[in-house]
Every structure is written in C-alpha cells, then in structure tokens.
C-alpha cells in the first residue's frame, strides 16, 4: 500500500482575475498563499508526512508545495520537478478573461475549450509574448514537445510517462508522495487513477489548496475511488467555485451580449 497526496496550487493572481493561465508563470495571490498554508495544516492534522514532493516547473505549484511543507517543517524533503506536471497549455486563450471569452464565443464553445476532453483551444503563435517557446526552463526540450495548445487528452499523454517513470517508483519504494500541480494536470492524473471515462472527466474539477489523499494498492489503483479530500466540505464549495469560473452555467446577465487516443486501460502503475 502507498499514499499519494495531490495538491492543486493555491489561488493564483490570474485565477483571482478570472484569466486563462496555462503555462504562464503567474504567482500565488495572498489568498493562494493562505490556502497553501492551510494545505500544510491539513497534512499536519491528518498526520501525513510526505517523503518526497513532485512539482511542475511553474511557481504557483512550487510555492504552494514550499509553503505547505514549511508548515509541516518538511522543507528539506527531496523535490523533483517536471514540465510534464505543468498546467494544460491554454494556447491562444492564455491571458484572456474567462467571462469575456464566454460572452464573445458563447457558452458551448467556451466549455468545449475549457473542459472537453479532446478539443484544444486555438494554438498560440510562437511570437506571442505569452508563448513559452523561448522560455529558458524548457530550453532542453525539443521545440516540437513545447505545446502551442493542449486538450486534456494531450495532458494525459504527456503526464503518464512521468507517472510511470518517476512517481510510481517512489510509491513502489514505500514513500508517501506529494504531487503539487495544477487543476488540469491533476484532472489528467485523477482520470488515470480512477479510470474515469472521457465523457465523465468533463464534469470533474479540482479545488485549490486542499490535499486529496489516495491510498493505493500494490497495482497503484486507489483503494477508494476518488480518494479523500482532507477538508471535504471546503473542497465541495471550492469545486463549485472552479466550475463557475467565467460565469459557469448561470444564465447570462442582460448585457452586450482530431481525436486523441485515451490512455491505455489496465494496471495503473505498470507500463503497457
Ligand atoms: O486557467 C487555467 O490555466 C486553468 C486553471 O486555473 O483554468 P480552468 O479551470 O478554466 O481550466
């Protein structure tokens, strides 16, 4: 048996402004820092002591992990970072306001870009100031691996090699693993862990800053599907808030007005 803790970063300054973020490296808001602190408190209260932390290359996840681990006096544990845990690349939508995008393109297109499994937003151009092609932290990645836009299926494809090659070996060694990442990279991981269908994953949202704990069996499958949030009531409310970003399903106020293959099924910790 192994313990896996998933932690979405605390609220970022762009979450607070309702902007599509993706690979843009924005910082935590003050509220996000408090959420990260509470994440650390929740780990302490639950007596969960991570042995190793895996983060993306983006500071909102890195700082969330640091703040939470500092609370637990665990800043010293080994850390591994990978672009494969980054947020979904939001393509040309990066930096755009969600509510305005919804208003401009309509609810259906907005939700297709935001939550459909296999439709990526329009690609970002390489000369766009919000493109990551010239970002130093990806300098060793072949240019074709740097996304210009991603749907969730793309995230599953790029995340799973890291799951198998880096996270599973830590779990197999009996370590309690903390993964500090992002709404959509964690949705991709949860889809894999809980074997959620392409249709069902559309409705799954991950709240900021609340640890989600999975106990895994010897095949790295969850003993309890969906795991357990350390503060279930707060998680429920926060999930609704994520769902409703950009105006959600609420009626609009009167104002101006190629398929990807899913991850192969089977044992979750084994390469197929
Ligand atoms: O903007 C983003 O990068 C993500 C996460 O904040 O947003 P969404 O929940 O709309 O996919």
Image: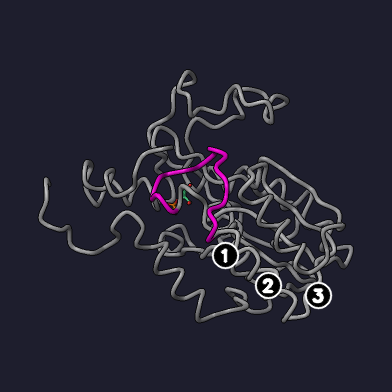
Q: Which residue is mark 2?
A: 214
Mark 3 secondary-structure assignment: loop
Give whichever of 239, 189 is nearer the camera.
239
Residue 249 falls in which quadrant of the image? Answer: bottom left
Q: Which residues, given as a range, are shown in magenta?
A: 16-31
Residue 157 falls in which quadrant of the image? Answer: top right
Check residue 247 in the rendering and tell me which mark sits there, or answer none.
none
Query: In the displayed structure, would residue 180 be above or below residue 154?
Result: below
Q: Which residue is mark 3?
A: 1
Query: In the displayed structure, would residue 136 be above or below residue 223?
Result: above
Can you tell me whether the CB of the residue at mark 1 lies under 8 Å from the nearest atom of ligand 1? no
Main SS, magenta residues = loop
Q: Position of residue 188 (x, y in %)?
A: 56, 55
Q: Position of residue 33 (x, y in %)?
A: 60, 59
Total labels: the figure holds 3
Q: Which residue is mark 1?
A: 195
């Amino acid at each position: 048996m192994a313990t896996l803790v998933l932690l979405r970063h605390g609220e970022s300054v762009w979450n607070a402004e309702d902007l599509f973020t993706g690979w843009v490296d924005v910082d935590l808001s003050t509220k996000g820092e408090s959420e990260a602190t509470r994440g650390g408190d929740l780990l302490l209260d639950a007596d969960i002591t991570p042995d190793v932390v895996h983060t993306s290359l983006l500071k909102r996840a890195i700082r969330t992990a640091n703040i939470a681990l500092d609370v637990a006096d665990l800043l010293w544990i080994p850390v591994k970072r990978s672009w494969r845990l980054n947020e979904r690349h939001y393509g040309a939508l990066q930096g755009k306001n969600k509510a305005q995008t919804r208003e401009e393109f309509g609810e259906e297109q907005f939700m297709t870009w935001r939550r459909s499994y296999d439709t990526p937003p329009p690609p970002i151009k390489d000369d766009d100031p919000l493109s990551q092609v010239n970002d130093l932290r990806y300098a060793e990645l072949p240019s074709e691996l740097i996304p210009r836009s991603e749907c969730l299926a793309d995230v599953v494809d790029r995340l799973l090699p890291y799951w198998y090659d880096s996270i599973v070996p830590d779990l197999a060694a009996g370590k309690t693993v903390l993964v500090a990442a992002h709404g959509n990279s964690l949705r991709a991981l949860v889809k894999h862990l809980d074997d959620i269908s392409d249709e069902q994953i559309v409705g799954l949202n991950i709240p900021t800053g609340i640890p989600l704990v999975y106990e895994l069996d010897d095949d790295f499958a969850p003993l309890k599907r969906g795991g357990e949030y350390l503060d279930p009531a707060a998680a429920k409310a926060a999930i609704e808030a994520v769902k409703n970003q950009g105006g959600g399903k609420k009626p609009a106020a009167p104002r101006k007005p190629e398929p990807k293959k899913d991850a192969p099924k089977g044992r979750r910790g084994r390469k197929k």
